[in-house]
Image (cartoon, grey):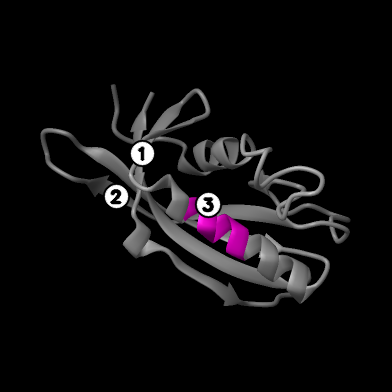
Amino acid sequence: MGTYTDAERAAADWINTLTSTLVGPGNPLAKGAHLTELRGASSACYALLSIIGSNTALAPENPDHRARISASIYGPTKEAATRAAIAYADTLIAVDGRPQPMGSAALCLVIDPDSITGPLWSPDLAGPRLLVDADFYLRPA
């Protein structure tokens, strides 16, 4: 078994399962997590995920994939995007060292709470945006 995973897809799959608290109608990140920019999504918030750093981590006997995932949280207004970014950051903190299955391809051993940065206001041409970055320690499933 290899060490590396499709970290972006794994994180998106995991986020999109959080339908009781984070994703879906009536929740802060209504349109979920995606790997490509949504067009015409200005009516609700969504996360655009990107891997911005990657290496192996922990001990050589147990090399796991450390992936730094950046979530660009877009919304119709700064206020809505801020609420969604805060909810996403709170979700990362709530993992609290408990392994999380992330789709069928990866297991997240931990999301390092000390690595979480943001929410950081970072508007761009696509609309109001905040960034939340975190280190995910992943193992192929």
Mark 2 Cα within 10 Å, few/some/many (few <14, many 20+)? few
Name the residue beneath numbered marker 1: 98
Q: Amino acid at mark 3?
A: Thr
SS assignment at label 2: strand
Q: Is residue 119 magenta?
A: no
Between 57 and 29, the one nearer to me in the picture: 29
Q: Amino acid at mark 2?
A: Asn
Residue indicated by mark 2: 55
Q: Of the residues under marks 1 and 3, which one precedes in the sequence?
A: 3
Residue carrying label 3: 91
Q: Residue at x 62, y 34 (%)?
A: 17
The span picked out in magenta is 86-92
Q: Look at the numbered disc 1 and give the secondary structure of its residue.
A: loop
In the figure, residue 4 lies in which quadrant?
A: top left
Look at the magenta stretch and give its main secondary structure: helix
Residue drawn at x 46%, y 41% as measured from the top left: 7
Q: Residue at x 74, y 50 (%)?
A: 27
Q: Earlier in the sequence, mark 2 or mark 3?
A: 2
Whether residue 9 is situated above or below residue 44 in the rendered picture: above
Q: CA distance from mark 2 to mark 3?
A: 24 Å
